Image (cartoon, grey):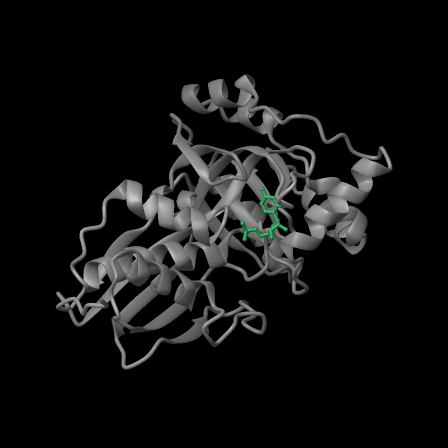
């Protein structure tokens, strides 16, 4: 029997952060088509806000900050936020539906898990709207069915991701970093980058060995040593992304020339990340990009995972 829960509020807004991968170790493709990962996620201060209200049917509307291209965001039930709502309702045997408003500050198809952030925020928002008090373990399990990065979007901070990325373990992080986030107007869909990783592995251009989390990076994070963090950053998908998109190499060279602590491709790309351990140097780097007409945002890290910002 399907039930209706008594709404506890009329509108709930939950904020979810973008993720970056300080280390992204990718192994050989599994039988299910996913790749075994050993990654270190860090949540950074670019956010999507998701507001849920009761609705006669499932519906979703997305608006974006300036510079965010919404073309690739579905406006129907295939939107991952709606899938999150359906999964939560099904988990509790509820017939409830809702309207979901997404305000995007995270680039779309940018390798920053923006869709995953929306799914995670929707789970938390609907849980509060409907007064369900779903346990953290259950939310993490539902999140894992929605996408590999969704559990991390719930917890935020800094965490190891294993399995296909969905098994998350928080780790100590004493750093206070600033990242300049440089999007690219042409997105790079994640599945294609993983497929190209397989092609390069077959050709022997990259090695798809069993991935490991580097102790050097974990130690540097725990000790709050930005220089050691910078030296230990790595991304196994970078070769595949640059091979698919040689136009990104020029942007990368331009960012390298800023003289920051490090430059990193975000996840499957095409977004680039420029690391600083000092906000004044980060602002100076950002000003150089402004002068050069390069779109970017400045974000602190690590930041919290999903949290309620408005409850009406
Ligand atoms: O889990 P998620 O839906 O975010 O994954 C999107 C796509 O990225 C998958 O369909 C798969 O092609 C690829 N992927 C992968 N290995 C992972 C995570 C994602 O191959 N560990």
Residue farthest front in this picture: 1
Does residue 188 appear in this view?
yes
Horizontal placement of 74 versus 9: left or right? Answer: right
Above-or-below relation of 126 to 280: below
The x, y position of residue 132, in whole percent, is 18, 56
* Residue at image coords 60%, 61%: 295
Which residue is outermost to the right? 203
Q: How many marks?
A: 0
The answer to whether residue 103 is left or right of residue 6 is right
Q: Closest to the observer: 35 or 62?
A: 35
Q: Residue at x 55, y 62 (%)?
A: 108
Image quadrant of residue 69? bottom right
Please determine whether, in this image, residue 156 is positioned above or below residue 39.
below
Q: Residue at x 63, y 53 (%)?
A: 190
In percent of width and height, residue 217 lies at 53, 23
**Which residue lies most toward the bottom here?**
56
């Amino acid at each position: 029997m399907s039930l209706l829960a008594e709404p506890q509020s009329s509108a709930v807004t939950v904020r979810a952060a973008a993720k970056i991968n300080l280390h992204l170790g990718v192994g050989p493709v599994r039988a299910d088509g996913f790749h075994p990962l050993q990654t270190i996620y860090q949540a950074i201060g670019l956010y999507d806000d998701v507001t849920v209200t009761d609705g006669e049917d499932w519906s979703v509307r997305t608006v974006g900050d300036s510079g965010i291209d919404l073309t690739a965001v579905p406006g129907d039930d295939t939107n991952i936020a709606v899938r999150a709502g359906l999964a939560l309702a099904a988990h509790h045997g509820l017939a409830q539906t809702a309207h979901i408003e997404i305000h995007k500050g995270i680039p779309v198809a940018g390798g920053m898990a923006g869709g995953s952030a929306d799914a995670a925020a929707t789970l938390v928002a609907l849980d509060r709207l409907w007064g369900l008090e779903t346990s953290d373990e259950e939310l993490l399990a539902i999140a894992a069915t929605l996408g590999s990065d969704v559990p991390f979007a719930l917890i935020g901070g800094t965490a190891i991701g294993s399995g296909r990325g969905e098994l998350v373990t928080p780790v100590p992080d004493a750093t206070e970093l600033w990242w300049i986030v440089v999007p690219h107007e042409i997105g790079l869909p994640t599945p294609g980058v993983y497929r190209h990783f397989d092609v390069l592995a077959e050709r022997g251009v990259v090695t798809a060995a069993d991935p490991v989390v580097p102790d050097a990076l974990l130690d540097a994070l725990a000790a709050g040593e930005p220089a050691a963090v910078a030296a230990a950053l790595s991304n196994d998908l970078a070769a595949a992304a640059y091979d698919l998109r040689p136009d990104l190499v020029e942007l990368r060279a331009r960012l390298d020339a800023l003289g920051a602590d490090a430059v990193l491709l975000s996840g499957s790309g095409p977004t680039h990340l420029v690391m600083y351990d000092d906000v004044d140097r980060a602002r100076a780097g950002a000003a150089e990009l402004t002068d050069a007409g390069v779109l970017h945002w400045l974000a602190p890290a690590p930041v919290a995972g999903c949290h309620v910002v408005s409850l009406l």
